[in-house]
Amino acid sequence: MTLVSDRTAQLRHHAALLDDTASRLGMDLQEAAIRGALKFDEISEAVLRCTHCSQPEDCAQRLQEGGAVVATPHYCRNTALLKRLQGVQ
């Protein structure tokens, strides 16, 4: 793979982790953006924050286990954003 395709794959992976986490918390990020509760730039920034996570494998494992998520893991770099969005609903 090239550096660009590696970075694209990384961004897609973390975007999926963020979206799956939000979904498990009962949120739809796309719907939040449509309602104006979330700006497009905030989604981009959240994905970039996620790429700096120290434990993406643990996050992916938690999400694969299924079931509802009641809170983000202690290491989640998007906890504040997701909590804010939960309060907006």
Image: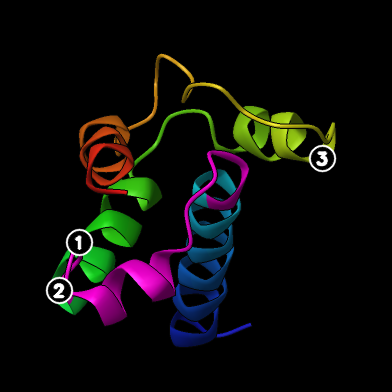
Check the image and name the residue furthest to the right: 65
Q: Residue at x 18, y 63 (%)?
A: 37
Tell me the amino acid under the disc marked 1: Glu
- Residue 72 x/y as whole percent: 46, 25
* Residue for badge 1: 45
Rate crowding at label 2 as few (under 14), some (14 to 19) or many (20 or more) other CA atoms within 10 Å.
Answer: few
Which amino acid is tagged 2? Asp
Q: Is residue 74 magenta?
A: no
Question: Does the residue at mark 3 contact the one at mark 2 (Cβ under 8 Å)?
Answer: no
User: Disc 2 marks which residue?
Assistant: 41
- Marks 3 and 2, how far apart in space? 27 Å
Residue that lies at the very extreme toward the front in this rendered image? 89
Magenta stretch: residue 27 in it?
yes
Say whether disc 3 or disc 2 marks the residue closer to the N-terminus: 2
From this view, report whether residue 69 is shown above or below residue 60.
above
User: Disc 3 residue type?
Assistant: Gln
Q: Is residue 47 above or below residue 33?
A: above
Q: Earlier in the sequence, mark 1 or mark 3?
A: 1
Q: Quadrant of residue 80?
A: top left
- Res 64 label: 3
Q: Is residue 54 above or below residue 39?
A: above
**Quadrant holding the N terminus:** bottom right
Residue 4 lies, in percent from the top left, at 44, 85
Which residues lie in the magenta part? 23-39
Tag 1 and tag 2, C-beta contact below 8 Å: yes
**Label pair 1/3, CB-CB below 8 angstroms:** no
Observer-nearest of 50 and 8? 50
